[in-house]
Amino acid sequence: MGKVASAYVAKESAVEAGTIPDPVLRSIGFLAFFDRFATPPMLVALATVTELTLAQAVQLVAAYSLFYALGQPLWGLLSDRFGRLAVLRLALAGAAVGAVTSTLFMAYLPLLVVRSITGFMFGALYPTLLTLLGDTRKGTDRARGLSDLQIYSSLGATLATLGAGAVATFVDWRLVFGLPALGAAAILVALARVEAPPAVRGRFRLRRAFTPAAVGLYAIALLEGTVLLGALTYIVPALQHAGVGIGLAGLLATGYAVGVILGARAMKVLVHRFSRTRLILAGGAVLALACGISMLWPVPAVVTVTATLIGVANAVMHSSMQGWATDVAPQARATTVSLFAASLFLGGSLGNFATATLAEAGSYAAIFGFGLLASVVLTIAATIGHAAWTRRHANRTTPG
């Protein structure tokens, strides 16, 4: 009976993933990253044309990330309980409503509320894609799939970074918030013809997502979010503070997406030559370098290099961490991946809240200095933690 149930669960996961066309999955990744990266490039514009101060505009990003993070455990539970497709449909509908509502207000409090709700809804998309990859792929094939997903997602980040600030400054900031609603509606239409298989209930236990190894990974992800997402938020504002115009600042900040794409392509080769532990170490070293150079020289050329290096670190270190998250508790994969993402974005939110006053004062060197310290601690903790987990995992799977 147990073998029959296990076969049915595996079949359901594979069928559910396979019924969603690859272009639709890639579009979801693109949309999720477009909305996530659209606000930071227009922070200064929001502070100019709305009732917000720059610190309040930064807090919109922090609140978005906070609710993106807080929603992850719920989305993971729903995904493991009712299926990946049901979660995608519900989240896309909510994201469309949140995106439209974001265009209706100019005051701080209502914008804070609607951007928080929008972050909560968009938060379901990318982790669900990671779970689908975890369900259907193994080993280096999964790593290649993660790299492909990063490429399409980075295109969304590129377009948002390149155009959001200019659109907000020269056209209307409401357009930047409204466009994701159209994308979500289009994807919902594409998913309308996809038939969801019956949900499998009771196929996992929540406690499996809270093993010591999983909890340790969540703690590392919290720190990763603080530096990786926290530092990235300030690329465009730091460039503008250094005297770069909004259009050029958006263009230079796309160095992040270039770094992700280059790093993701390199990962297709690197995963065959180096262990995941070594890739985490290498990516962490790149992240520390990225923050360190802008701490010392917060000038436009160096900040642009920082953006590119953060992208490389994301492709190398963070994709390796994502692979770890899909393996650490496979019996509750969606819940585990969601808690991992929750920790990541909670860290990013806390980092932004903690440094908002430094941004208001223009102290970007100090912000990147904070990132340097956090990245060093992160690299040490993640490398040692993954090496220890790998040894324990190998011992459990070795006969005798």
Image: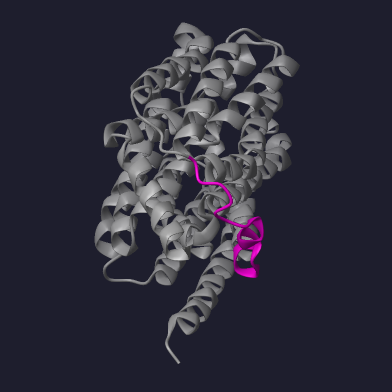
In terms of depth relative to the viewer, which is nearer, 136 or 59?
136
Residue at screen point 64% across, 25% down:
117
User: Magenta segment, which residues?
Assistant: 199-215
Residue 216 in the image: state x and y as whole percent: 63, 65
Residue 93 in the image: state x and y as whole percent: 51, 21
Residue 203 drawn in magenta? yes
Q: Quadrant of the C terminus?
A: bottom left
Left or right: where 8 falls relative to 199 = left
Residue at screen point 29% across, 64% down:
270
Q: Is residue 373 visible?
A: no
Vertical relation: 159 (above or below) 350:
above
Vertical relation: 393 (above or below) 242:
below
Residue 288 in the image: state x and y as whole percent: 51, 58
Residue at screen point 53% across, 80% down:
392
Residue at screen point 56% across, 44% down:
81
In terms of depth relative to the viewer, which is nearer, 7 or 60?
7
